[in-house]
């Protein structure tokens, strides 16, 4: 029997195993409803919304920690495994959706913008694109204005030659 001794054994052996933990993470993010201890009725805030205790936004780092990884980078590395790619991408898409929705919330827009730019592909803030400015192109022209052309007996510059040609066309001499 040969054992694979290269590297650490996989943290998860099936996508179903990781899906259960992902579902639990999102359920934990919702928090629990606050109920009156005597009546058991749900309590509402001044805007008539139910009050949740322990609710928190879903994040890529929070998901990584809930799955037992030490960093979000470890989760992203695990996403590279073919069997878990779609499962982790789906979970990250749920986080991205929540974060994207926060862009329309005055209180969470800056944090949402930061998270989208740093945790998800193709979200970036490019000042030239945002301001509809064309990209800056620097042209470096280090070609000399005059070229020296050597004829049989004489040496003249290309610009002198052009001047003579123009003068002949005009009927004048330089």
Image (spheres, grey):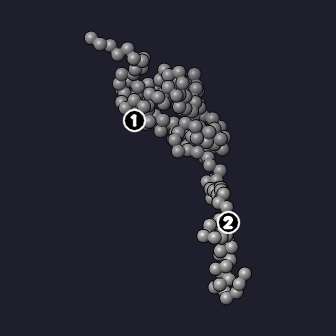
- Which residue is located at x 58 percent, y 37 percent? 118
Extreme residue in the bottom direction? 171
Extreme residue in the top direction? 1
Residue 159 numbered mark, or none: none
Residue assigned mark 1:
86
Residue situated in front as seen by the camera: 115 or 46: 115
Q: In this view, does 108 lie to the left or right of 121?
A: right
Crowd around label 1: few <14 · some 14–19 · many ≥20 (10 Å): some
Q: Position of residue 108 (x, y in %)?
A: 64, 40
Q: In this view, does 89 lie to the left or right of 99?
A: left
Label 2 or label 1, whichever comes before in sequence order: 1
For label 2, the SS is loop
Residue situated in front as seen by the camera: 44 or 5: 5
Q: Where is residue 16 in the image (x, y as percent from the top left)?
A: 36, 26
Quarter of the picture holding the N terminus? top left
Q: Distance between the residues labelled 2 and 1?
A: 63 Å
Quarter of the picture holding the C terminus? bottom right
For label 1, the SS is helix
Residue 146 numbered mark, or none: 2
Q: Which quarter of the picture shows residue 141?
A: bottom right
Q: Is residue 94 depicted above or below 134 in this figure?
A: above
Q: Which of marks 2 and 1 is in front?
A: 2
Residue situated in front as seen by the camera: 40 or 138: 138
Crowd around label 2: few <14 · some 14–19 · many ≥20 (10 Å): few
Q: Are marks 2 and 1 in contact (CB under 8 Å)?
A: no
């Amino acid at each position: 029997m040969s054992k694979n001794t290269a590297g650490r054994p996989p943290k998860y052996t099936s996508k179903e195993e990781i899906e259960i933990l992902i579902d639990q993470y999102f359920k934990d993010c919702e928090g629990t409803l606050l109920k009156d201890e005597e009546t058991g009725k749900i309590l509402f805030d001044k805007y008539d919304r139910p009050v949740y205790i322990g609710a928190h936004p879903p994040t890529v780092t929070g998901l990584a920690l809930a799955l037992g990884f030490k960093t979000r980078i470890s989760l992203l590395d695990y996403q590279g495994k073919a069997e878990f790619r779609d499962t982790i991408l789906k979970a990250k898409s749920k986080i991205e959706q929540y974060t994207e929705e926060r862009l329309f919330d005055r209180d969470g827009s800056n944090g949402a913008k930061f998270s989208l730019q740093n945790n998800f592909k193709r979200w970036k803030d490019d000042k030239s694109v945002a301001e509809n400015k064309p990209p800056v192109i620097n042209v470096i022209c280090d070609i000399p204005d005059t070229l020296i052309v050597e004829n049989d007996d004489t040496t003249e510059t290309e610009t002198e030659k052009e001047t003579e040609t123009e003068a002949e066309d005009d009927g004048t001499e330089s």
